Amino acid sequence: MARSSVRLIIRRAADHAGVPLDGLSPHSLRRSFATEGYKAGVSERELARTGRWASVTTLRGYDASSRWAAPASARLGL
């Protein structure tokens, strides 16, 4: 499916649901899928297969669940 088609589907669904488009994109939905899957305890293998990530390493870059939980700056006292 073309990226433009996905954007159109997102726009129509957001309009129908009365949700603003701010921050909604194919990429943000992909990131949310990975993050929520990690939070729910889904295995990386299953997430990668379902989300069609070529590697688990790439999938891990999409996980935002713990990104701000313990930032390096906190350990530095900043």
Image: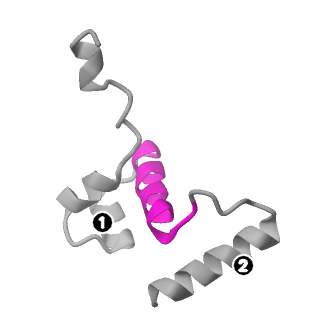
Spot occupied by residue 27 in the image (x, y as percentages of width and height): 44, 66
- Dot 1 amino acid type: Ala
The magenta stretch spans which residues? 24-40
Give the label on residue 12, or none.
2
What secondary structure is the magenta-colored segment mainly? helix
Magenta residue check for 23: no
The quadrant the C terminus occupies is top left
- Dot 2 amino acid type: Arg
Q: Is residue 22 above or below residue 25?
A: above
**Disc 1: which residue:** 48
For the point 23% across and 14% down, which residue is it?
75
Work out whether mark 1 precedes mark 2 in sequence or the reverse, and give the earlier one. Answer: 2
Spot occupied by residue 58 in the image (x, y as percentages of width and height): 22, 61
Q: Secondary structure at mark 2?
A: helix
Disc 1 and disc 2: Cα gap in Å? 27 Å
Give the label on residue 75, or none.
none
Q: How many marks?
A: 2
